[in-house]
Image (cartoon, helix red, strand yellow):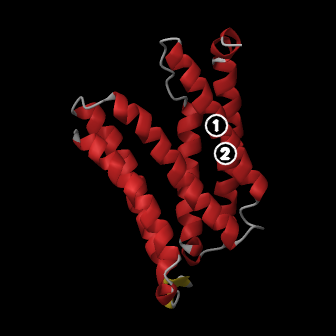
Amino acid sequence: MTTANKLTILRVLMIPIMIIFLYIKALDTSIGFLGLSVNQFIFAILFVLASLTDLLDGYVARKYNQITTFGKFLDPIADKVLVLVALLYLMLLDPSRVPIWAVMIVIMREFMVTGIRLLAVDKGSVIAASPYGKFKTASTMVALVIMLFNDFGLTPWIGNIIFYIAIIFTVISGIDYLMKNKKVVFESI
């Protein structure tokens, strides 16, 4: 097993651990840091560490030629689940700040992109990530980290603005993805 795949598996394993920490009642006490409880702080730290494994596994895979079919399959799934767990947690924590419609936009875009990629694989093509998609990912991760750490004591407007920028780029990248790959979709109908 390659180092890149081990990092991806580590990210997958961190996700249920993040969730478990939220349910440990003994850790639901304030740490006096940014208004977080112990379990919220651990969840946020694990999210950051898991996000860093995403950057690291891609770097390792490319630098050391460790790109595998397993990695191509599991890496994007791990990324999507990690982001969705954080979004759903934040939505439950404060639905006025992370509304269900925004979470649904992210979920619908991810299902659409995954579906188009599966159709492309069936046709023998590989679809590269677009710059819009990369900006969507970066802005989403930054917004989630800011929100998970209660805005680092700053005004919530910063996290909110970055979050809505991420949602806008989620829509833009989804439309871009669909338009660039409509041939693959229509050939499959």
When the figure is inspected, residue 71 is found, relative to residue 6, above or below; the finding is above
Q: Which residue is mark 1?
A: 111
User: Residue 135, position in %: x, y?
Assistant: 56, 41
Residue for badge 2: 107
Query: Where is 99 relative to 117, above or below?
Result: below
Contact (CB < 8 A) between labels 2 and 1?
yes
Q: Amino acid at mark 1?
A: Phe
Between 188 and 47, which is closer to the camera in this rendering? 188
Q: Position of residue 97 (x, y in %)?
A: 73, 66
Q: Quadrant of residue 188?
A: top right
Q: Is residue 159 above or below residue 136?
A: below
Q: To which quarter of the image does residue 146 belong?
A: bottom right
| Amino acid at the residue labelled 2 | Ile
**As drawn, is 17 to the left or to the right of 115?**
left
Looking at the image, which residue is at 62% across and 59% down?
Answer: 87
Which residue is depicted at the point 26% across and 39% down?
Answer: 60
Q: Quadrant of the N terminus?
A: top left
How many C-alpha atoms fall within 10 Å of the one at disc 1: few (<14), some, or many (≥20)?
Answer: few
Rendered position, 117 above or below 88: above
| Label 2 element class | helix
Whether residue 8 can be seen here:
yes
Q: Position of residue 155 (x, y in %)?
A: 66, 73
